[in-house]
């Protein structure tokens, strides 16, 4: 009783204007309790649990948030396990819609109000962690006699606000103790943990709601950017901000020197706060090293940023995560490659013959190996280049030979390459160059799953998955009677097409990956200078990926100080100067209005015959940028 009287007297002294050793946030709450809420510290009230019908309504309204926050609550509860903490998730009205506590103390928790359905609004309960957090929007610890109502002075409550993507307070995460014999400073770690958990819940909520938009995540440290970012924003196709976490609103305000409380970033262009626009986002994806993903505020401050591309609506496309690893690693999000990968994943575990189309050097054998590695077959992958084996040897190389079958044949005979692939995959590269006379023998192998060696009599069964590839138009070869029609239809049971490198929108992802891989193989580190990167982007790549690999190998070998310069690249990088940008190109790059930008970009595309690569070169940007602008401006090729 003496303690209660002393507590009431201290509140009365604060009301009379006396100075207090309490935190200012506590003093201001006490004043609100008396002046605004008309509460009396001398009339304690027990904890209030809302009726079940009301609780159901509150939980239904918060159902989405509860689902998103639950994982965060469980993680936090494990972090404080054994310390008798109770976790409360309260909605914006202060009603507890989810909680975690020790089952051994449920009766005590319910009596104290640390229970599902308890209302902790400041107007009902007075100064408390949840209620005062709702009023101020600030994280805080209300420790023991910080509470206004003497009923709650044994408690120690630490709370942090959770804001929705529009900046409105939507919930409070609270971690409380029934009693704490220690000083208020003992709850500093709890304050840090609950604030960090609230931040992660906001991030998860933004990612869940804005998955079909660009999301840009920030960190002051490159080491934590991809694993535990500080803040995030969502952007629409024109670069305007659709949603933020609270931390992001604060970071953006600091970046351009304004008061974040007075100016919401929602609806504002990202260029108002940062020196960037929507077309810079592809350069901030995981295809580039974390330390290079820097963005600068209008005040010159620097942040590390990670851009996440819009995700397709569920059910319309198979997520990349469900693709077998070897197939998933073939691209960095190029639409043509993505469609091919989904088809390849479905075909990988079948024995259906597959014919791969693609220009020389476009990665046909790499795709074939990925299909084999994803097939579950235990036999080997045997690759045969039909154009590289001399015509007089190709029959015995493919099918083997019996003992003494011809002059020079081994005494015991020899197994051919086809039989060597038994139980695995046979890859026939440049199948269009196979001699016409041997095509009928290959047809028998595919149709009957058996072969007869040169000079042999008895057929031998073989269990093989047949994948073939050609840069020729096999239909044209059939029309010219240079390729058997029946073999063509056997090989072409399923077809996969690889786009040329110049047509791929994930060129920069592939480039960064190759630089890292080839540098590691060479036993050194290397990165691209901006000038070297631009030179590689502007090249036509008639030799496709094979030419790019050769260029990267040369650059890695020649570069100094681990930085690749244009002088380290093949001759094409220095022999052809970048074309001067036309006035239409300059308008397309930085047009004052969407209508003018659309017209200027349309002019460039029409002038290049809708060749995206050529348009990108004329504009001095990469293909990804052109594709993004076309999508944003709703420009589609005539055919």
Image (tube, rainbow, N blue to C red):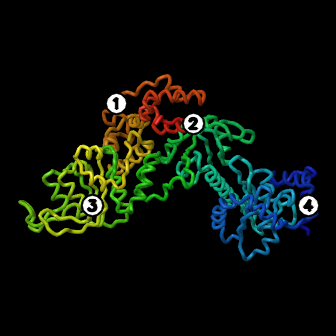
Q: Residue 64: x and y, percent?
A: 68, 58
Q: Residue 627: x and y, percent?
A: 49, 38
Name the residue rendered at 70%, 46% in the picture: 166
Q: How much space separates mark 2 and mark 4, taking CA atoms?
A: 55 Å
Q: Quadrant of residue 577?
A: top left
Left of 499 or right of it: where is 211? right
Q: Residue 387: x and y, percent?
A: 21, 48
**Residue under pointer 3:** 446
Left of 572 or right of it: where is 230? right
Q: Quadrant of residue 65?
A: bottom right
**Residue under pointer 1:** 574
**Residue under pointer 2:** 277
Query: Which of label 3 and label 1 is nearer to you?
Result: 3
Left of 625 or right of it: where is 498? left
Q: How much space separates mark 3 and mark 1, taking CA atoms?
A: 49 Å
Q: Residue 292: x and y, percent?
A: 49, 43
Query: Which of label 3 and label 2 is nearer to you?
Result: 3
Question: Could you classify mark 1 by the number of other residues whose Cα lies within 10 Å: few (under 14), some (14-19), or many (20 or more)?
Answer: some
**Residue under pointer 4:** 41
Q: Quadrant of the N terminus?
A: bottom right
Query: Along the polypeptide, which appears first: circle 3 or circle 2?
Result: 2
Query: Along the polypeptide, which appears first: circle 4 or circle 3?
Result: 4
Query: Which of label 4 and label 3 is nearer to you?
Result: 3
């Amino acid at each position: 009783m003496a303690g209660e009287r002393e507590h009431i007297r201290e509140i009365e002294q604060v009301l009379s204007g006396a100075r207090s050793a309490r935190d200012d946030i506590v003093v201001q709450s006490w004043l609100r309790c008396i002046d605004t809420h008309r509460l009396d510290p001398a009339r304690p009230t027990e904890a209030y649990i809302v009726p079940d019908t009301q609780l159901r309504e509150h939980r239904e309204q918060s159902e989405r948030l509860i689902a998103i926050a639950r994982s965060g609550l469980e993680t936090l509860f494990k972090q404080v396990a054994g310390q008798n903490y109770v976790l409360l998730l309260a909605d914006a009205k202060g009603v507890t819609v989810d909680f975690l506590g020790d089952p051994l103390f449920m009766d005590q928790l319910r009596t104290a109000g640390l229970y599902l359905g308890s209302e902790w609004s400041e107007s009902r309960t007075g100064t408390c962690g949840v209620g005062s957090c709702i009023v101020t929007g600030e994280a805080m610890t209300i420790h023991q006699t910080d509470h206004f109502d003497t009923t709650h002075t044994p408690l120690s409550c630490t709370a942090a606000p959770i804001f929705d993507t529009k900046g409105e307070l939507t919930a409070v995460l609270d971690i409380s103790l029934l009693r704490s014999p220690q000083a208020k400073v003992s709850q500093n770690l709890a304050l840090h943990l609950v604030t960090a958990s609230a931040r992660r819940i906001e991030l998860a909520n933004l990612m869940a709601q804005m998955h079909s938009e660009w999301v840009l995540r920030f960190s002051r440290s490159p080491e934590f950017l991809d694993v535990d970012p500080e803040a995030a924003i969502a952007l629409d196709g024109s670069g305007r901000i659709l949603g933020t976490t609270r931390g992001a609103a604060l970071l953006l305000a600091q970046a351009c020197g304004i008061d974040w409380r007075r100016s919401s970033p929602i609806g504002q262009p990202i260029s108002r706060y940062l020196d960037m626009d929507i077309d810079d986002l592809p350069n901030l994806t995981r295809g580039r090293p974390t330390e290079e993903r820097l963005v600068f505020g209008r005040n010159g401050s620097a942040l590390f940023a990670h851009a996440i591309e819009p995700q397709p609506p569920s059910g319309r496309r198979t997520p990349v995560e469900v693709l077998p690893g070897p197939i998933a690693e073939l691209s960095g999000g190029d639409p043509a490659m993505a469609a091919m990968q989904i088809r390849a994943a479905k075909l990988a575990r079948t024995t259906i013959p597959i014919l791969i189309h693609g220009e020389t050097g476009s990665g046909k054998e790499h795709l074939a190996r990925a299909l084999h590695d994803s097939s579950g077959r235990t036999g080997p992958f045997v690759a045969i280049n039909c154009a590289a084996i001399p015509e007089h040897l190709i029959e015995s190389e493919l099918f083997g030979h019996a003992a003494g079958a011809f002059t020079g044949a081994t005494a015991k005979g020899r197994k051919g390459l086809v039989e060597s692939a038994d139980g695995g995959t046979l890859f026939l590269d440049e199948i269009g160059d196979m001699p016409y006379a041997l095509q009928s023998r290959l047809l028998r192998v595919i149709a009957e799953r058996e072969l007869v060696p040169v000079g042999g009599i008895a057929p031998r069964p073989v269990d093989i998955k047949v994948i073939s590839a050609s840069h020729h138009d096999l239909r044209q070869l059939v029309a010219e009677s240079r390729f058997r029609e029946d073999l063509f239809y056997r090989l072409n049971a399923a077809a996969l097409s690889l786009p040329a490198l110049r047509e791929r929108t994930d060129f920069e992802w592939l480039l960064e990956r190759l630089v890292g891989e080839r540098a590691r193989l060479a036993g050194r580190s290397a990165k691209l200078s901006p000038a070297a990167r631009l030179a590689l982007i502007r090249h036509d790549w008639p030799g496709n990926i094979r030419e790019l690999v050769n260029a990267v190998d040369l650059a890695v070998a020649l570069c100094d100080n681990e930085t690749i310069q244009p002088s380290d690249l093949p001759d094409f990088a220095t022999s052809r100067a970048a074309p001067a940008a036309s006035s239409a190109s300059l308008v397309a790059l930085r047009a004052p209005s969407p209508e003018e930008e659309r017209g200027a970009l349309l002019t460039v595309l029409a002038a290049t015959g809708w060749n995206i690569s050529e348009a990108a070169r004329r504009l001095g940007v990469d293909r990804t940028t052109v594709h993004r602008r076309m999508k944003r401006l709703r420009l589609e090729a005539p055919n």
